[in-house]
Image: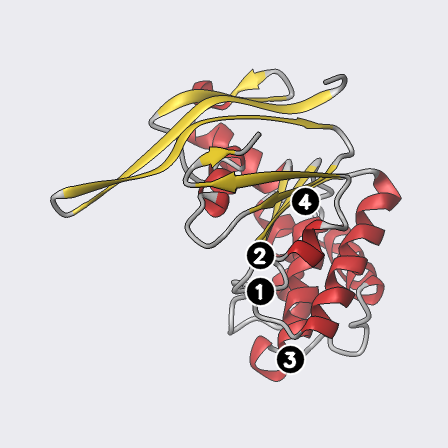
Amino acid sequence: MNNLLLSARALTKTYILGKRSLDVLRGVDLDVARGELLALRGASGAGKSTLLHLIGGLDSPNAGEILFDGRDLAGFSERQLTQFRNRRVGFIFQAYHLLPELDALENVCLPGRMARLNRSTVEARGRDLLARVGLQDRLDHKPSELSGGEQQRVAIARALINQPELILADEPTGNLDSRTGGEIIELLKSLRAEKQTTLVIATHDAKVAAHAGRVIELADGRIQT
């Protein structure tokens, strides 16, 4: 694949649960091109979330390698991994993971503040992103004052605040009704297309996966061919 952003080889991940082990990933190979819209499709427990966590640097594999822009994540120090997650990857989770004590704008701007970017620049970018996702009138609303769809829009804006090269969306429509979920996917596609950001969506929903340029099926910790 030309113009690779990310390449993973022979990834395995096993969790120890009491006296037994659970093999979640069993030798997964994955290539992702710059600007690609890729869907990882599979049932609950197939290993989709684990794979996203590994390629996003949130967790590490038991075996295998992950190269991002030609660099092996295993060679990153903790500080480098933190910077990688903060500046080069944007995460969108099914459960939103917004901080309840912060309003929408503060939640969106938080990754920029953590990156120690200029405060006024980050706030201006946050306001613009919230306007882009249709929440220009909800800047000072806290998560408890927002609907599920609105919270997911805040999460999308937060994922984009540091202008990452890769966006990882883990079941981004899982907690939403079908109409709102459709709107979220169209919004993600539109924002991705503007800067040709790479987007990987993990989903169990065939309708969501159908929006992707390429779909990879994951079952029992293996990619189906």
What residue do we see at 16% from left, 43% from top?
20
Of circles 3 and 4, which is in front? 3
Of circles 1 and 4, which is in front? 1
Q: Secondary structure at mark 4?
A: loop
Q: Which comes before the other along the chain, label 1 or label 4?
A: 4
What residue do we see at 58% from left, 76% from top?
143
Neighbour tally class for label 4: few under 14, some 14-19, many 20 plus, Cα within 10 Å: some
Picture layout, residue 16 above or below residue 181: above
Distance between the Cα atoms at labels 1 and 4?
Answer: 32 Å
Q: Which comes before the other along the chain, label 3 or label 4?
A: 4
Where residue 27 sits, quadrant-wise, is top left
For badge 3, the amino acid type reads Ser
Residue 28 marker: none
Where residue 157 sits, quadrant-wise, is bottom right
Name the residue tied to disc 1. Answer: 174
Of circles 2 and 4, which is in front? 2
Residues at circles 2 and 1 in contact by the CB criterion of under 8 Å: yes
Distance between the Cα atoms at labels 2 and 4?
Answer: 29 Å
Distance between the Cα atoms at labels 2 and 1?
Answer: 5 Å
Q: Secondary structure at mark 1?
A: loop
The residue closer to the viewer here, 163 or 186, is 186
Residues at circles 2 and 4 in contact by the CB criterion of under 8 Å: no
Q: Which comes before the other along the chain, label 2 or label 4?
A: 4
